[in-house]
Amino acid sequence: MIVTRKKSFLALFSILGLSLILLSQCTGSGSQQVAGDGEDKTAGTQKTNERSPGSTGQSLTIAVSMAADEFATLQRLSDKYMETHTDITVQMNNLPAKEAYARLKKASQLGEAPDLMLLDNAWISEFAALGFLQPVDEYYTGEKSSQRIEKVMNQVKWNGYMWGVPKDVDPYILVWNKKAAEELKTDSGPATAEEMLSWNKRWMKPEQGTYGIYVDPTDPNAMLALLSALGGTMGEAAMPTMKAGEAASVKTMESFFEPQDAAWDAKQYALNYPALQAAPQAANGPVWQPWDLLATGKMAAMVTTISEYGRHKNVGVAIASLPQGGGPLKGVWLGGRSYSIAARSTDAKAAIEWIKEVTSPDAELKLWTETKKLPTQLSVYNTPLMRGDEHFHSYDWLISNGKSLPFDTENAKKLSTLQSELERLHKGETDVKTFGERAAKLWTAAVDKNTATPTPGGSSEPSGSSASPTPTPSAGSTPGKLPGVGASASAKPSVK
């Protein structure tokens, strides 16, 4: 066969082009977006300020887990930092929420953790005790430690050191539909455990398209907040799960999860409480949108966080504190996250400087404005923008009455186990009694971290009262309401 010179060149260029394509597929690109779970389509990796080959600048790797809009805001704050630190390369990785704990723990065990990790506050003591972190006391020079909410600061203390820099705080609340309350001839949400059971019994009719008080059945933190609200029937305990296996507690949970007055039915439970993790598309039906149902009056109320409410605010709904359990259960469950530096990191100084940039008062105010995560810096609560928020006094009250998990270096592992048990219950692999018995074994005895701080010797000592996030007293609240939501400043607080 005779091959012309033109055809020879074409064949050569084709081979070269194919080689380049294969090479690029093998090497990949660090800035390529990798789709995460259904909640976050931007989970993946982003790089900024790439250095030229041979540069001697520093490299900083950061792992977080957050929604797409929050990640975008954080990226902009990071880019601002890069403008004045041109010798540093930053690589940010946004992990899917359900995978973050396991992936970061595994990477730490293998010595491959990123320089910086955004950790749930409940994980920090475990990561520190396992030697995965290095102290960040260097960050808290001068009066920096006193410039943050003390209750949040207590969550990052262990063995006499600080292991994280708090980023945000996110109290659990009850969001209720105003029309649902009007039907009961009241202007407030359910204020007691009994009223929550009553609301559920009245509206939980999924076969008719209506729902009672929703809670994500696979979210361990939301479930702890709910069980605390139902705690009046669960006796005196430091954790709402500690007596979850007892007959009275099992009955309360069954009555709440399935108010249809029938024997426990796993299929009915799944119908009453579709899991948010099923989003964006349920297996055999339309997209599950609880916020839309709540706004239109097809759902009576929802256990959720301040930030989620802020992202879905609607004129048809209002916020309230969850009913308060007695004794140690009294208080508002506080969620929150902090930046921690990996023990293996050799760029601790660069990491500290980056943290200072993205947790400054201006940065926290920006993050609150765009993502509705409450700040941890006290000064932010004195800004006109924050004070002008209609729920300002409610934020103050919630944080002032906040509580967190009892101190335990295995809290992260226990929360992961609790989530697994919740998923098994939701799938019908166990019943409420079995779930309660297993949950009760997780926290059998613990020191309340809000009243004690661990010391190097392993003992605990009082940490003192936690300051309010604002310098002025909180406004009062009435049952089912929060200050700043139709309650006068002289109203008697529902929790003392």
Image (tube, rainbow, N blue to C red):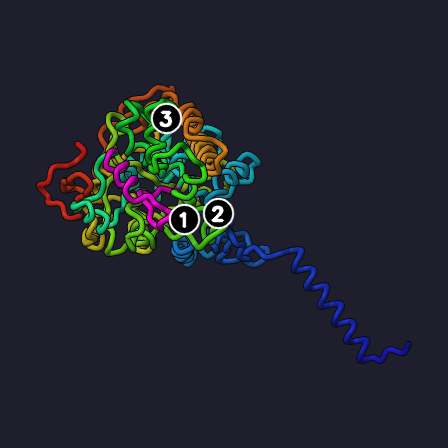
Question: Label 1, label 2: how many angstroms apart (C-alpha)?
Answer: 23 Å
Read off the residue under disc 3.
244
Is residue 350 visible in the rendered image? The answer is no
Up the image or down, 462 lies above or below 347; here it is above
Residue 239 in magenta stretch: no
Q: Give the range drawn in magenta.
A: 194-216
Q: Which of 291 and 491 is in front in this view?
A: 291
Where is residue 300? Give x, y as percent: 28, 47
Label 1: which secondary element: helix
Sequence-earlier tag: 1 or 2: 2
Sequence-earlier tag: 2 or 3: 2
Q: Residue at x 44, y 30 (%)?
A: 431
Up the image or down, 356 lies above or below 465; here it is below
Q: Please identify, in this view, whether the residue under mark 1 or under mark 3 is nearer the observer.
A: 3
Q: Which residue is drawn at 27% across and 26% down?
A: 328
Q: Within 10 Å of the Cα at label 3, are there few (<14), some (14-19), or many (20+) other Cα atoms?
A: many
Q: Within 10 Å of the Cα at label 1, are there few (<14), some (14-19), or many (20+) other Cα atoms?
A: some
Sequence-earlier tag: 1 or 3: 3
Q: Horizontally, is 58 left or right of 25 in the view?
A: left
Kindly check if marks 1 and 3 are in contact, taking CB atoms under 8 A apart as contact: no
Residue 200 in magenta stretch: yes
Type of amino acid at the residue the image marks with label 3: Ala
Question: Label 1, label 3: how many angstroms apart (C-alpha)?
Answer: 43 Å
Which quarter of the rendered picture does the C terminus lie within?
A: top left
Read off the residue under disc 2.
96
Q: Residue at x 41, y 48 (%)?
A: 354
Up the image or down, 4 lies above or below 278; here it is below
Q: Which of 12 and 411 is in front in this view?
A: 411
Q: Please identify, in this view, whether the residue under mark 2 or under mark 3 is nearer the observer.
A: 3
Read off the residue under disc 1.
354
Type of amino acid at the residue the image marks with label 2: Pro
Question: Label 2, label 3: how many angstroms apart (C-alpha)?
Answer: 30 Å
